[in-house]
Image: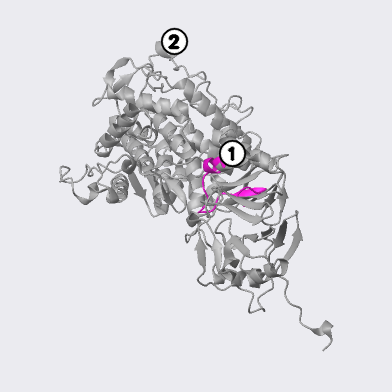
Amino acid sequence: MDSSMKEKKPVYFTSERVSAHVTRIRGAISEYMYLVEGEDRALLIDAGCGVGNIAAYVGTLTKLPLTVVLTHGHYDHCGGMYRFDEVYLNREERIPTAIHYTEEVGARIAKEHGFSDDPEAVTRIRDIRMLDLEDGRVFELGGGVEVETICCPGHTVATMAMLIRPDRLLLTGDACHWITYLHFESGLTVERFRKSLVKLQTRESEWDSLLLSHPVDEAPKSLIPEMIGRCDQLLSRKTEGLVFEKFDDTCLHYVAKKDGELANLLFDIRKVQEPKKTTQVKDGVPYEDTFAAAGLYATCASETSPEREADTSENRPEEAGNASGKRLEEIWQTMFYGPEDERIYHPVGEDMGYIEDTGNHDARTEGMSYGMMACVQLDHKEEFDRIWKWTVTYMYMEEGENAGYFAWSCQPDGTKNSMGPAPDGEEYFAMALFFASHRWGDGEGIFAYSSWAKKILQACIYHGAPANKAMWNRDNHLILFVPGCPFTDPSYHLPHFYELFALWDEDNREFWQKAAEASREYLQKACDPVTGLCAEYAEFDGTPHLRTQAEIDGGNPYRHDWFYSDSYRTAGNVSLDARWFGADAWKESELAAYQKFFLKHEPVFGIYEKDGRVIEGQALHPVGLLATIAECSLVTIHSGDEETASNGRFWLEKFWNTPLRKGERRYYDNFLYLFAFLALSGEYRIY
């Protein structure tokens, strides 16, 4: 037969020499493996995706005795390991979530890349000897050639880099790439990844350039310090100059990059800060049940016999999560479907419903948006859609000077009590709608959740001309008490929301980045450093907002320059910001001071000046106040100061053993209670 008629064999691998002792091998899906040869032995770094016989191919490149090491357990690095009898892989990588290769994966790759006609294309899984690849292991290959392993957790739990001597090459592979992926379930936090980068950078004098995996093969030394800088920006929340690109439809995974620099970091927005030692992982995402972390397994105070013996199942450590879950379900059922004197939710017709402010007998944007947040956090789509439809039907204003906003108060029949809006409702509506979009998907019309969220935020920033009815001051980026007014309400400041708005409201990303930073700086001015208290309304410099003389002369009896109902929310907001985006020194100090102050004033809470001076009267919403005090324990129980940690445990236990409020004032208290319980049980999540 003519040789030109012979069937061509598939080409799975190609190779090229990159240094005196290193050969780069390119696999079927453009993954790279590296062969390092000394005088006595050879070392193969990674085994490829499992398509093609990598062992046979390496045999054409070297006749030296061969050792095989794997940088980590992803299929495109470990698939071909079954072609060898023995491989090295760190023991932490040998878990089901790390080793992704299966024969089905191999067959899919072979088909996608035109190799399915070859029966030998797919590597078959078989028993092989697995040896532990330890950090700092040196493989001596002869003639002064050696390879040292450097463990660099980040991309996975134990990704390995390889320092190749004397060629002065650092193979980072996927550990640090032009675009480093941290978003996998097996990926770690930005903070942990940074520690690995610093570890590599301390040894920069030992290498001149980087070897990478996948289509981009090499990188200059500047990649690592630039990647450290990227991490620093994310950890400090100083993201000005960063570009964020959405990676997938989850809206949780973003590529952070900076113009003119090489480093691109793909991260999960829920996995930035390193979690506490007591943190657990669910679906690859860190979370903490603070009740369990504090060693609190008290029985539910709503049980018929709260004095039950201490060995009941709710008191056992292994049952703590179940106890928190049961309590959350009880809270939901009581607030939404309990008796008339306990519930706050009322279905209307076949497809609507509203939240009642039971103290004022109206429906408010505050309560409606809180109700929607509760629904999306607890996965109740029907109730979410009912509340949202009632909101759009009766509260949304399409005409007049406040067109594009929601009327802040309506009667239960939908009649508007006011044509004015309240910014705290709008920001909660937007956040709840984004979460709904990501958790359940967008629908049509008013149920195109993400479109409505962006529509609301656009109005908040740009309403009116020249922005005189906007809800944010566009010069200082601070939220206002009402549109266009010259002061603010500290409890409205939600920098943890604005961080997410900056990702999901792409057209206004720069504004929301600045708003998050401005609000964090503002809260430090608004909260007293000794008591942790703030006023209900405050000036832009943080000082309490006083009634004008005209208001006093006109008979206005209401003060808002003191620590009262609105103010309670502020500490809870700071606590949730710390949970989602990390606790800095100020947050730790603020929350510790807040809890310490109230130790002197429990069990009966009063009314206070910002500096702690007592004013005659009692707190209107004592259960809600207790909830926000306890929510500070998200941070304080982890304090290195024993007094602070002890205070955190005290308030946590007091909250756990306090039931929901009953009576006409229950609405506000019980929402603060629910939000605190969600946060403390680890269930107040980013979706």
- Where does residue 145 sit, x and y in percent of width and height? 67, 53
- Where does residue 137 sit, x and y in percent of width and height? 56, 51
Does the magenta run of residues contain 194? Answer: yes
Residue situated in front as seen by the camera: 45 or 248: 45
Residues in magenta, as a range: 174-195
Residue 87 visible: yes
The kind of residue on which mark 1 rests is Val
Q: Answer whether labels 2 and 1 touch (C-beta < 8 Å).
A: no
Residue at 39 percent of width and 49 percent of height = 378
Residue named by callout 2? 549
Res 559 quadrant in image: top left
Res 545 quadrant in image: top left
- Where does residue 672 sit, x and y in percent of width and height? 35, 36
Q: Which mark is residue 198?
A: 1
Element under disc 1: helix
Residue at 71 percent of width and 67 percent of height = 13
Neighbourhood count class around disc 2 (C-alpha, 10 Å): few under 14, some 14–19, many 20 upward: few
Neighbourhood count class around disc 1 (C-alpha, 10 Å): few under 14, some 14–19, many 20 upward: some
Residue situated in front as seen by the camera: 656 or 369: 656
- Where does residue 138 sit, x and y in percent of width and height? 59, 51
The kind of residue on which mark 2 rests is Gln
- Residue 468 vs 64, above or below: the answer is above
